[in-house]
Every structure is written in structure tokens, then in C-alpha cells.
Image: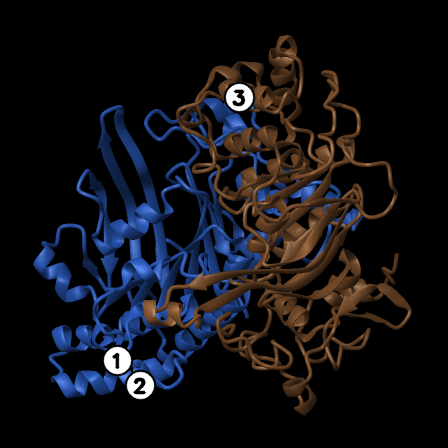
Amino acid sequence: MIGSAGSGSAVEGTAAANVLEVRDLRVEISTRRGVVHAVDGVSLAVPRGDAVGLVGESGSGKSMTLKAILGVLPPEAKVTSGQIMLDGVDLVPLPTSALNRIRGPKLSMIFQEPMSALNPVMRVGWQIAEGPRVHLGYSRSKAAERAVELMRRVGIPDAERRFRAYPHEFSGGMRQRVMIAIALSCDPEVILCDEPTTALDVTIQDQILRLLHRLCKESGVSLLFVTHDLPVVAQLCQSVAVMYGGQIVEQGAVQQVFAQPCHPYTLGLLRSAPDVEQVRASLVPIPGSPPSLISPPEGCRFHPRCGFAELDCTEQMPELRLLPAGRSTRCLHYERCLEPLTAEGAAR
Amino acid sequence: MTGPEPSMPPEGVALAGPVSNDDADTGPLLVATGLKVGFPIGGSIAARLRHEQRVLRAVDGVDLEIERGEALALVGESGSGKSTLARALTGLVPLDAGEVKLGGRVLKGGRRSRADQRRVQMVFQDPYSSLNPRLTVGGMLHELLRVHHVVPRSEVDSYSRELVRLVGLDPDSLQAYPRQFSGGQRQRVAIARALALSPGLLVADEPVSALDVSVQATILNLLQDLQASLGLTLLLISHNLAVVRHLCDRVAVMYLGRIIEVAPTEELYASPRHPYTAGLLAAIPRMTPSDEDEPPAVEGDPPSPLRIPAGCRFRTRCPIARDRCEHEDPELTAAPGRPAHLAACHFPLERAASATAPVGATTKEQTSPSQS
């Protein structure tokens, strides 16, 4: 797969090139202990037909970003500022009724746990047919036809018969295929994916990733793919954004970011995970724990855990700044990340 | 249980010595033969009365040996029976058939005597549900040490402190409740709890899959250090083949209740013999993207363990299945010249052959012979 260098990471793109653009999004959750700044100024762009990965650990704000885009934030959370431009329309101020006309035909979502996202007492065929019935005004029989066709497209064998099955009769991989069929049912422009393969076995994950890749190519749908699994992003996506403490800390074309990370957190993620392709003597964990999002550290959010931190890192919060080749980083001393990897590369 | 209860000499506070509570023979630490574990699946009452109850064979005839001090991995997909096998070895589920011997002594399949419970201990996957939320870490360890008479009462405190230090926690954490810890720290507590009884074998069932990537590394490093410093014998259950490769000396691959391939780690990753293993390895996402237009490494879903295919159980998904596979159940047999590399396949893959599966990564290792 060839990374579409440049176009993927440019935040200030033209509306035509980027089907989805998030600009300076902020989400706050009020809790008894204070206000959690779950998403703190996130900007990202999904170019038409591309797959963009959004990676980070739990609590980094990646799922909240997705929920904000889809407009399904929990009641205690709210978008305090920013824009979510889908095809030139800002979704943030829209009322639910208007969002409901967009969710489905333009924007849809694949969840991590298909068993809890599917209706357990409704035949899967009718769950797939529901979208076309509601949004596209299909008749019952036409929608059913569409559902069977979609089930075939996502690789569910014996689609006519399986139409009448219930979710519990499906395996985990087949349920995720049903989810994908539902997401595709109204020909959306963007599908948001929240760790869609995390709950699956590795052989099934392989099947689902290949399916998503094929569907993207066939239908030109764009993906915003949230995961904590870097190799999955490397397989599927053209560009990637790394989140830490509610902010995007690095962005760029997948192959470049993973080969030559420009933020110590990305470097830390890459060095802490064991790699099937090469055995390392020991793994290098990232010391410390993720920051509190109620009172985040002053300056760079990563500096308490960063081996390269200097005095200036503790004083000012670094902005996401542009680097060559359409990449960007939030690190003041990103050049230092380049050294350890090259040293490791030389030792190989 | 007959025979004299082994006397329990106070083993002292020093944990640094090699963990040993086994008879002084030199064979493998654990020998399991012909293990079978089944779970009855509820049918109608009439079916039960007619003794036609359906049984899910989670473990269906497993032979396994674990050498002293080695780290053996058990890999496979969900439903392959790897967790059930681990639980059977730990004595958490009763055996339908077969025998588990640890250091020459037969361990019962179901409920074990206290002395036998000590010999195999387990670390569970989810540290959020495997620790008692109402006990402090100290309370947890104290109870365990008292019930099992591990050390004299007067030494319980110092021994507990030593244990938490061993897993890299602060002695103050003895006063803390599980909710006060992060996921990685909880898993450290779970490891301390398992090590408190100085078991001969530590079974770790997916110990890092509930943790974040950066935290996983700390637990993997801890297990590696403990193995080196205590001479711990480790059985690691995992679906993550990268973790396995990092930590283990030998790998056993399970499919539908059977072990279908066993080999030293590097050899297995470099030249798998069973087509399922080859597919499993090819399915791992890698940092260098593969050709996404290729068909998936392994097609289809695993069959239900209620309807295990006759003959070779992988034949329904196997790219090279032939007639013979339908009729004959393959036995685990060694590769010519490689006695440690066993596979249950009629047509095992040749050494250099990853031809049936697009294993991108193995090319690197194949240049250096990894036979030990």
C-alpha cells in the first residue's frame, strides 16, 4: 500500500479533497472531581477515499473524538468549541433531527463489540435493511434485497438463509461482517471505526482488515480508524494521527511516522510493543502513567514521562507544528527522537 | 489423597533462591498425558435422561511436557481450548481423562489438596476482576500465607514486603486496595499473589492482553526477569504471537482442543510445519504493509467444537487438504532430523516452504539456521 504522502496530514485542506475535517475540537466532561478535558484541540482531516488511523492508549481521547463526530457523546460530555465539517457542513450546531438524516447516508460507524451493538432479538437481515428503509425510502422487499446483496459483499456465506438468523447464531467475525454491512447499507461517505478488530482472533482480524480494504477501494468510502494496535494501522491506513492526553501529538503518512517518529510518545509506543518480525533483548516501557485530564501537566503533556524533556518543555505547551512532507509534531525537540531509532537500526 | 502429607518446612524469607518444591528427579517438570476436558451442553431433560447429552470437547487428547525453567507458550484462537487446558493443569476444572504429573507426583484433575494447590499457580487475564476488591494487598497475601503455612506467623509481614518488592511495587502498597492501582500494578499484585506460594509452575493466562501497550512491556519485562532470577517455569497462554516470541523458549499451537504443532520458538516462527501455524503467522499485522489484495491467510471460521470434523480437524480450512486428511487423524510426529519440532499434519510444510502462505517476515530468519 502506498501512503498518500502530504494530502493525508494537511489540516488546512480544501473541502473537496477532505470529506471530513475536524477543526480544533474540544470536548469536556463534567465530573464531581472537576472538568475532564477529554479532547483538547484536535484537528484532523480525512481525505476522500483514504483510511486515516487514530491511535493512542485508553484515556487518550480517541474514542471521545469519534463519539463527538458521530454526535453520540454521553450526556455529561459536551463539545465546547470547534467544528466538525462533513462535506462542508458543520455538524456541531446541528440538532438531533438533522443529524439523524446525516448518520447513515453520509456517516456511519463500526463498533468494537458487535454483540452489544447489534439488536439481539431482531433478525440480522432486517437490521441491515433498516437503514435503507428509513433513509433511502426503500420498500420492505427492496430493502431486503439490498440487505442480502450487502451480506454477500461482506462475505457472509449463504446470505439468503442467514438473512433470517439472529446475532447469537453468528461467530464473532461474522457479526463484525454484519456490522460492516449495516455501516455500508446507505452508501456513507465516511465510516468511523472504533477498534473493529480488537475483539477478534488474528486470522479473523486479517479477514476483516482485507475486507475493509477491498470495500474502501470498491466504493471509495473513507475510514477514520481508531485503534491502539499500530501494525493494524500500518496495514490499512495511509495516514495516522497519534493522540496523547486529549491532543494529537504527531501526524503524518503511516510509513514515515512509524519508520521515523517525530514525537517521543510515538517512539515509546513503537519500542514498548514486542515485534513479531524481530526479537529485541528487552522491551522499553514508557515510564510513568498517562496524565490526568482534569489538571494536565503544565507545558508539554508528555514531559513527565519523556526522556528528552528540557526546561522549556515544562514551561510552554508546544503547538502542533508542521514539518516537511506534510507531517506535524507537538514536540519541541523532535530531532532527538531520530537518534535512538537510527542507533537501533545500525545495530540490526 | 493417600500418602503422607509432605512436611512443610519453613522455607525462609529469602525468595531469591530457585523456586523448588518438587521431588528431586531430573525429567520434565510437568508431564501431561491424554488430557481430555469436556463440558456438557444443556439439552432437553429428555435427552439427558436418555444419556444423549452433548459434550463440548474443549480439550480433546493433549500430551504436553514442560521442562524445568523453561517458558512454554500455548497459542491458538479463541475456542481452541488453550485456557481450558491451562485451567485443567492448574486444577480449576476436572479432567475427563488423562493424567497430570508434576515432578513425578500425580496431581488430581479436580479439587486438589492444599499442598498440591501450591505447586501450580495462575495469573489471570483481567486484573480488574481477579483481585478481591475488599481486601488490601497485604490482607490478600497474609491470608494466603497463613492458610498455606508458607512461613511462620512472625515472618508473614516481612515475607509479604519481600513479595511486593519482587514484583516492583512499593511496600506501602500492602495497605492499598486493588482499586487504588492501575491495571499494570494490579497485574503485579496478581503475580505477587501467585508467587507467594513459590509454585513449581506459574500459569499465566493472557497476562497482558487487558493492558495498554506501554504497560504491557513492563509486565512482560517483569515476567522475563522473574524467570531469570527465580528459575521460574512458565506456561504462557496467549493469542499474541509477538508477545510469545519475545518471552518463550518453546511454543505449542492449539486448534480445536488439540496441540497441532510444538517447536522451539525461533524454529516455529522461521519454518512452521503445520499449515494452520503458517496461516496464523501470516495473519499477524506487520509494520511493513503486506499486499492487501491477497486472500486472507486463513479463510473461514473455526468449526464449532461441538462438531469437530472427522480426520484432520483443520482440513475444512486447510489450503492443502487432500483425501487422506478426511479419513485419518494425523498424530503429532517429529520432523526428520528435528526431534523437538512436532506437527500433526499428513503433509507438513517443508523447511524453506512458506510458499503456501505469504509469510513476509520469515524470510529474514531463514537465512540464519535457528536449530538449537
**Residue B363: % across, % down:** 76, 68
For image coordinates 48% across by 15% down, the residue present is B175
User: Which hue belongs to chain B?
Assistant: brown
Residue A167 in sight in this render? yes
**Image position of A126 (left or right of B127):** left
| Viewer-side residue, A209 vs A177 | A177
**Residue B322: % across, % down:** 67, 89
Badge 1 is on which residue?
Answer: A164
Badge 2 is on which residue?
Answer: A161
**Image position of A29 (left or right of A329):** left
Mark 3 lies on a secondary structure that is: helix
**Marks 1 and 3 belong to one chain:** no
**Residue A166: % across, % down:** 28, 72
Residue A308 in sight in this render? no
Say if B338 sits above or below B147 in the image.
Answer: below
Which quadrant is home to the N terminus of chain A?
A: bottom right
Kindly identify which numbered label has been placed on residue B143. Answer: 3
For image coordinates 37% across by 82% down, the residue present is A153
| Viewer-side residue, A22 vs A58 | A58
Give the distance between the C-alpha atoms of the residues marked 1 and 3, in whole angstroms. Answer: 54 Å
The residue mark sitting in front, 1 or 3, is 3
Question: Which amino acid is tagged 2?
Answer: Arg
Question: Which amino acid is tagged 3?
Answer: Glu
